[in-house]
Amino acid sequence: MLLDADQCYRALRTHDSRFDGRFFVGVATTRIYCRPVCTARTPHRVNCRFFPSAAAAEAQGFRPCLRCRPELAPGHSTVDANRRLAQSAAGLIDDGRLGEARLPELALTLGVTDRHLRRVFQEEFGVAPVEYAQTQRLLLAKRLLTDTELPVLEVALASGFASLRRFNHLFRTRYRMTPGELRRSSGAPSAGERLAFDLAYRPPYDWIAMRDFLARRAIAGVEAVEGNRYLRTLRVEHRGRVLTGDVCVSPSARRAALRVTVSPSLAGALPLVLSRMKHLLDLACRPDEIAAALGQLAERHPGLRLPGAVDGFEVAVRAILGQQVTVSAAATIAGRFAAKFGTPIATPFEALHHVFPTPAAVATLEPAEIAAQGIIASRARAIVALARALGEGRLVLDPSAPVEETLAALESLPGVGPWTAQYVAMRALAWPDAFPHPDVAVLKAMGTSGRQALALAEAWRPWRSYAVLHLWKSLEKKP
């Protein structure tokens, strides 16, 4: 992001970790400089000075904060972003990875030693990785016991415990009651085989806009919108197994939350499934801060969220297919692609019958096989190149990926230009400051040319992704 003081202060007020290490803030009244994620009280705008590096802040006489420790910011630590490392490890643990691998293997995945991982994790969370994982498993088990009818053995396995005996012992030790006693005290759960969860958000949340956005781009057989529900198939890998199933999203009737129901076939990987749905639905958003930054642009549609992704490859393929064609035409082509190369699946929803193909499956194809589905040859080559880059580890498409490096890697692929790369960053990387350029609809909504649009969009940093959504929304026909 460019170092504009007003833009930096907007990011500072949200304490958004996506901006950690991208700038530092010096507080004139204390002569201390901090990271934008610092948990100290947010200083007044008039007292803030913003710097591109810790060295720049210190050159102006500011000393480092002892609470947020600027030396640990991503890209500024001698041991490579300790806080981000701990957060990445926590994310993998939340996805159930520590249940299927030992800590040294998890550390190897993150490119560090297990000793170093234990140290920075303890520093960040106050507990060892194993203790953190146990708490996450127990909290998920508690929720399953209260909200579902799963047998206790299945609850234990779905929560990541290797044995019922270990689960019962730890549950009784921590909560001073047995799993059965908790279930009886909480009353009978809702009837039905599907697993239901309410995922909370900060109001307002424009569910209708999110639903309609996903509906217009739905890949036939993989996604569908029926009434007020969004449906889709899902594939996850857990403990060396591939699990497939379906999810359904609708507004919760009881609270500021979205009700997500999950097919029993995905019960063994619930942490990962719920994590992906939170990303898709942008549930961590701070709509009040974004609305304040966007001003009049956001007034007509408060609570507009940034649709994410459950599969970065799926979004990237969809973006390539959407180059220079209408949204509906791209959805039609994507449906043919999924039906030909995806995996058939049985679901209780007539509209869902395929899981989107994996990068590994597409990487084995010749571009001509893809082009035979009515896809332009250059885009077929781009899709194969994308799949091979993901399969070889040269590219990662999830929110943990570094933005600048990922954008560069995407644009190095044949047939992938700035518009496609920025769109993928918006959704697969959940990057709030992406600006697909030159997007025809954005230019039309802004009433200006490409170069002028880039200049005008600077006022919306660091929330240009949300500005793009509002611009697209402004072109929709009123009912």
Image: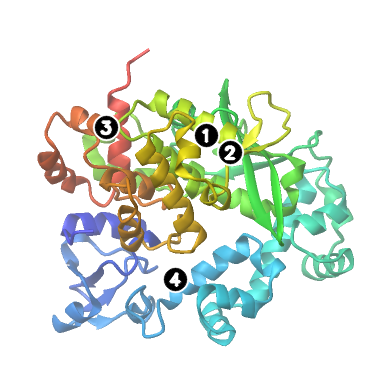
Residues under numbered marks 1 and 2 in contact, where contact means CB atoms less than 8 Å apart: yes
Quarter of the picture containing the N terminus is bottom left
**Residue at left offset 77%, top offset 69%:** 174
Quarter of the picture containing the C terminus is top left
Q: Which kind of residue does numbered mark 2 sit on?
A: Phe
Of labels 4 and 1, the one closer to you = 1
Q: Earlier in the sequence, mark 4 or mark 3?
A: 4
In this view of the protein, can residue 240 be seen by the observer? yes
Residue 147: percent from the left, percent from the top? 75, 44
The residue labelled by disc 1 is 337
Around disc 4, counting alpha carbons within 10 Å, would you say few (fewer than 14), some (14 to 19), or many (20 or more)? many
Residue 84 marker = 4
Distance of mark 3 from mark 1, alpha carbons? Answer: 29 Å
The residue labelled by disc 3 is 471
The residue labelled by disc 2 is 341
Residue 46: percent from the left, percent from the top? 16, 62
**Residue at left offset 43%, top offset 51%:** 386
